[in-house]
Amino acid sequence: MSHTQTAPSQDVVRVTGLVKRYRELVALDHLDLSVRKGEIFGLLGPNGSGKTTAINCILQLLSYDRGTIELFGESMAPNRYDLKTRVGVVPQQVAVFDELTVRENVDAFCALYVRDRRRRRQLVDEAIDFVGLGDYVRFRPGKLSGGLARRLNIACGIAHRPELIFFDEPTVAVDPQSRANILDGICRLRDEGATVVYTSHYMEEVEQICGRIMICDRGRAVAQGTADELKRMISLGEKITAEVGELPEGTLERLRGLSHVRSAELSDGTLLVTCEPSPHNLTDVLGALAGAGVRLGRVMCEPPTLNDVFLELCGRELRD
Amino acid sequence: MGSSFVVTLKSLVRAPSVIIWVLAFPIIMSTIFLFMFSGMRTDGVADPISVALVEAADEKDGAAEALDFAEVLEALSADGDDQLLDLRLVETSTEAANLLAAGEIEGYYEVSADGAPDLTVADTGSVGAAVLDAVASSYVQSGALMAEVAERDPATLNDPAAVALALGLSAGVERAQVTHATPDEIVRYYYALLGMATLMATQAGMLAVASAQPCVSELGARRAVAGTPRGRQLVGCVAGAWVVSFAALALAFAFLLLVVGVDFAGREGLCLVGVGACSLLATAIGAFVGALPIRADLSARSGIMTGLTCLLSLFAGLYGTAALELSDWLARTAPWTAWVNPTKLVCDTFYSLYFYTSLAPFALRVAVCVAASLVLLVLATAVFRRQSYEHL
C-alpha cells in the first residue's frame, strides 16, 4: 500500500457529533467515531441502526445536518477528490459493469483513481491476483459464481491501493470457503498497511478480524472497544451448561440464590446457568450441585460472545 | 474522462438493450418497410383512364371537329409506358352514359356543334376527371391558337417547327422546379423511421448517464464516491453515448441509402451532418431522462423512453396513412409541434434536405437540434451534480 502522511492523532477517520435526519426520523444522533491508522474497525449494529448512513455520510454520498467528518486529518467534503482518491469502497451488493469482463471491470474502477495507464495495468494485475481471479479475467460478471463475483467486487474496490477501505457486509450470501478467503484478504490488506472499516452482521467474523469494534444503535454509539473490552461491559460473565438428568427439588432455587448467578434453567436434562462476571462462578455452581447430590454428565463453561454483547446492548426485539 | 468514455463505449455496444433497440431496430424496421413499400410501388404505376367518345354522325354539325379530337384521343391511347387513356368509341350519348353509370369509364366526351369537346364525368373531384378535363382544355386552347395564327400570319403554318413550338408546353410556359427532388410519399415514412430511430438511440444516453447516478444503482453510487470528479465522468458518459448513437444512426442511414435505396436527393454528405445533429439530440434527451431525479431504475427509465418514442413517432406519421394524415393535420393546425416533437424534427431535418432546394430550412433544423441538445445537456448536468445517494 502506498501511504501519505496522516494527522498526528493517527486517526484516519474522525467523526464528531454527526447528525443526520430524515424529516422526523433521526438516523444519526450525535455520532462520534474514530478509526486509527492500520486497524480493522468493526461497525456493528442492528438493521436501521445508522451504520450504513454513517458510512454514506463519511463518503459524502449523503449530506448531513450537523457534525464534522475528517479523513486523514482533513475535513471531508463532496468535492475533496484528493481525499476520495485515497479511499476504497466495497459495497454490500456486487456493483460492477455487467457488460465488461473481470479485467475490464477492475481496470474501469482503477481508472477512476489512477490515470497512468502503465501503473494501472500493474495495479489491476495485482488486484486480480490478490482475489485469485486470474483464471477468470475474460469472464463477464454474469458468468461468475456468487463467491467469485464477491471477489471481483473486492478487487474493484482495492485495485487503486487505497489507504482506507470500507467493506460493507462483503460476505453476505457466500459459502464458508469464499468467506474465509475474503476475511484472509482483508487481514492481508491490513497487514500491508491499509486501514479498514468493516460492517457485518456476522459476529464471529467481526470478532475474528476486527481490532476495535463499535456497536451503534438508533444512530448512537452504544459501545466501543476491543472484543474483550466489550465483553467486560456487559453483565453476563459466563454461561455454564451441565448435563444433570433430574434435579432434586429446590436445587434450582438454591442455584438462583448464589451471589453471581443471574438465571438457572433446566431443559431436557440440561442445566443452563448464566452468571455475572466473577472468578468463582464455576466452582460455586458445581459445589451447589454436588451438595444437592446431583450426578453430573458433561459440563461446559463459556465466556460471553460478541453476540451476547450485541443482544444485551441492543436488545432482543426484532428490527426492520 | 477518457476512461469513462471508453467504459461507456464498451458497455453500450455490449448492452443487449442497445444492440436491439438502437442498432438493430432501425435496420429491422427498414427491411420491413422495404418489403411493404416495394409492393406499393409496383401497384402504384398509373393505369390508363377509361374514357369514351361519342362518334358524331357524318351529317351532324361538328362531325369534322369530332374526327380531329378523336385523332388526339387515339394518340393519347396508343400502347406504351406513357399511355394516358383507354379510349372507347360509342355511337350515342346514351350508350356512353350507361357505361359511365356502370363504372366502366371515368367520363365521356361529346363534341358539340361548335367543335368543342364536352366532358361528362361521374366524380368531378377525381384525378381521372382532372386529367380528362385537362386533355379537353388543351385541345380547345391549341385549336384557338392555330385559328389565331392562321388569321394573323398564315405563312407560319407552313413551318412545322413553329407549329410544334406553338403547340408545345414550352410555348409561353415556364417550367418551375419547386422541390429539390420529385416528392415521393414513401420517403416520408423512411424519414419518420429515422426520427423514431433517433428516439430509440436515446437509450444509449439514458443508460450511460443513469448508470453513473448514485440514486439509480449501486454501480452509480460506487462511481459517485470515486476519485474522478462527477462532472468529468458525465462528460465521458455523454461523449461515449453520442458516439454510439451516431454510429447507430449512421448505420441506419447507410442501410436506407445503400440497401433500401431511399432517395436522399444526392445530399448524402449533408445527411451525415444531420445524423450528427440528430444523434446529439438523442444523446441529450437520453442524458436528461437518465439524470432525472425520479425513483426509477434503469428498466423503468428505459420503458419511459420506449413509450415516449412510440407516442411521438405517431405524430411524425410513422404508422401509416392515418398517422401521416394526423401529422399533416398537426402541421397545419399547430405547426409549433414540429419543433418540439423530436421525432418530427428529425424527420423534417432530412425532409428539408430532400424537399427544398435552399439549405436554409435544413440549417435551421440542425441549429434547433444542436440548441435543444445543449439546453438539455446543461439541464442534465445541473440535475446530475445535485443527485445524492439513497442506498448503498
Image (cartoon, coloured by chain):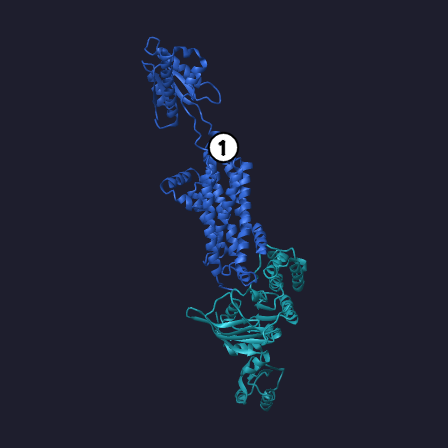
**Mark 1 neighbour density, 10 Å: few (under 14) some (14–19) many (20 or more):** few
Q: Residue furthest bottom?
A: A291
Residue A266 appears in the figure: yes
Mark count: 1
- In which quadrant will I find the N terminus of chain B? bottom right
Chain to which mark 1 belongs:
B
What kind of element bears circle 1?
Answer: helix
Q: Report whether B287 appears left or right of A290.
A: left
Q: Which residue is mark 1?
A: B39
x, y percent for residue B307: 45, 49
- Compared with B344, A308 (above or below) is below
x, y percent for residue A223: 53, 78
Q: Amino acid at mark 1?
A: Gly
x, y percent for residue B263: 51, 35
- Compared with B321, B82 (above or below) is above
Q: Report whether A97 appears left or right of B84.
A: right
x, y percent for residue A33: 53, 75
Q: Nearer the viewer, residue A46 or B343?
A: B343
Report which quarter residue B228 is drawn in: bottom right
Q: Colour of chain B?
A: blue
Residue at (45, 26) in percent of width and height: B46
Q: Report whether A64 appears left or right of A192.
A: left
